[in-house]
Image (cartoon, helix red, strand yellow):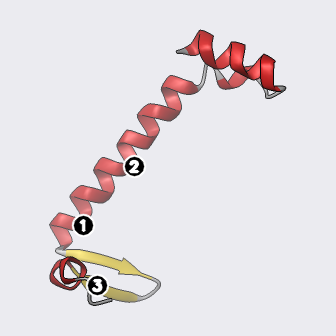
Amino acid sequence: MQWLCVSNAFATGLNPLSGPFFPLSSLLMIYIILRATVLTLWKNGIHWRGTYYSLAELRANRI
């Protein structure tokens, strides 16, 4: 995957350093998604800009 990212970067004129950082960015994204999921389930909802939205509201699509 790194080789593909580097070769694609050269072909499109992007920074070839994106290839070596691809695995790191993938792991970071997985961590962010897992953390958000765990916190949402643990707190039974989310806080967004000072407002609390419960999971029941979110699942009912009443927002």
Residue located beneath label 1 in the image: 40
| Structural distance between the alpha carbons of marks 2 and 3 | 20 Å
User: Which residue lies at the image location 46% right of the left edge and 33% below the top edge?
Assistant: 26
In the structure shown, which secondary structural element does the residue marked by tag 2 occupy?
Answer: helix
Front position in the image: 47 or 8: 8
Few, some or many residues within 10 Å of mark 3 (<14, 14–19, 20+): some
User: Which residue lies at the image location 37% right of the left edge and 40% below the top edge?
Assistant: 30
Residue located beneath label 2 in the image: 32
Asked if the residue at tag 1 contacts the one at tag 2, i.e. Cβ–Cβ closer than 8 Å, the answer is: no
**Residue type beneath disc 3:** Tyr
Give the image location of residue 36, x and y in percent: 32, 58
Residue located beneath label 3 in the image: 53
**Residue type beneath disc 2:** Ile
Q: Is residue 16 above or below residue 42?
A: above
Classify residue 2 as left or right of residue 45. Answer: right
Residue positioned most to the right: 13
